[in-house]
Image: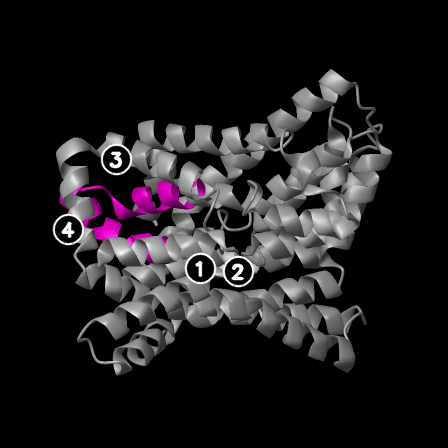
Amino acid sequence: MLLAMILLFMLLIMLGIPIYICMGASSAMWLLCSDVPGFILAQKMFGQTDSFSLMAIPFFMLAGQLMETTGITEGIMKFANSLVGHIKGGLAHTATLTGMIMAGVSGSANADGAAIGAVMLPALKRSGYEDGQAVSIVAAAGALGPIIPPSIFMVILANATGTNVGDLFLSGLIPGIIMGVGFMIVNYLYARKKNVPVSPFLGFQNIWKTFQKAIWALLMPMIILGGILMGVFTATEAGAVASLYGILYGICIRKLNLNSFINCLVQGVLSSVGPMLLIASSGVFAYMLTTLGTDKIVADFVLTYIPHQRLFLFFILLLGLLLGCFIDSIASCLMLMPILMPIVAELGIDFSLFAIVFSISFLTCTITPPVGTLLYVVCGVDGTPVTKTIRPIIPYVLTMAIIVILIIFFPGLGIWLPSVL
């Protein structure tokens, strides 16, 4: 029965059917072929979404829409450019630094990638960056969104495992910053190889000027992260605060009216539908896998052949790089967590360490074809074919993998901040 359900699931994926339908259909087929009551389907789907922490998803989606509508992105970008625009690969560094700052607002890779791409792609291409390279730079910058807190992916991961969202947020802060620096190194090497021109340094007065214009935009991630770090509010409340701040900011600068606000609400809801459908369908799918004994089969295999902590974490990295080419990161998280959690406990791995290794490993799929949703979003901003990004995106994927390896050998990068705070 287990083999039949897995084959059905893979067949549906190869047919290009949305992943939540694949999980739901294979689970429904299992229910029809077993003596499990049919109401379990509805019960598990509802139970999986009945969570206070998941309310953070629509709030952060709304915050991302407000950020784009009110022009917060542009202010942050000008400030970032004043800091790093004069370095070799300056515009690319600006995109990366903007992605690092904006990651502290929306927690969504797609929202950050679309917002950065709308402004940066034309500028990058005018400066001499090839089409595929420009898209890869912006996509990599957007990929920092789910790693640097707050993170919608971390919210879903915490909900799936019953762990503290704040700890998971903190585990991604230092690796996210290191990853941003790694992306800048890749940008520098490309710009040096292609001799991409740089803009002159306009002085500290220009930095102060752009900082003054961007201060209200920069306060947004500072309030969110500061509130979470100091325990003032939870991740869900942080999403609400971010949305409220975005509304007040938009009203004060007169870029948000009733029509644009309603449009932000609609887009925020529509953006939340995909993740929530995945979460709902994963409830019954995980129940099916557990009932059929998948967790025991995998646990026996891992504990027999991969009995050491570091080997298991390397296994997670390889699994993320391979599985991520075919299945979305959120879907992978929801399917695998019920199976992997007992193994993590058995091996005595700190969950914050496992969480950040798992997150970065599986978030590589956001920028790798053929599933890379973020890559498609950024390509769609100006119509660049995805095929042009296949080679340029490889150094950024390798950078993410190197960061994971560093965390495996130096666990403090992921667990020091949660343990201290």
- Give the camera-side residue of 197 and 341: 341
The answer to which of marks 2 and 3 sits earlier in the sequence is 2
Q: Which residue is mark 1?
A: 228
**Label 3 amino acid?**
Phe
Q: Badges 2 and 1: C-beta atoms under 8 Å apart?
A: yes
Reply yes or no: does residue 351 show up in magenta: yes
The residues colored magenta run 333-361
The answer to which of marks 4 and 2 sits earlier in the sequence is 2
Q: Badges 3 and 4: C-beta atoms under 8 Å apart?
A: no
Say what secondary structure mark 3 lies in: helix
Residue at 37% from the left image edge and 36% from the top image edge: 317
Measured along the vertical axis of the image, is residue 337 above or below residue 317? below
Q: Position of residue 225 (x, y in %)?
A: 50, 56
Say what secondary structure mark 2 lies in: helix
Label 4 or label 1, whichever lies nearer to me, is 4
The answer to which of marks 1 and 3 sits earlier in the sequence is 1
Give the prevailing secondary structure in the magenta stretch: helix
**Label 1 amino acid?**
Ile
Residue at 39% from the left image edge and 71% from the top image edge: 280
Residue 176 in sight:
yes
- Give the camera-side residue of 32 and 76: 32
| CA gap, disc 3 and disc 4 | 16 Å
**Label 2 amino acid?**
Ile
Q: Quadrant of residue 402?
A: top left
| CA gap, disc 1 and disc 3 | 31 Å
Q: Which mark is residue 296?
A: 4
Q: Which mark is residue 312?
A: 3
Q: Which mark is residue 224?
A: 2
Residue 229 in sight:
no
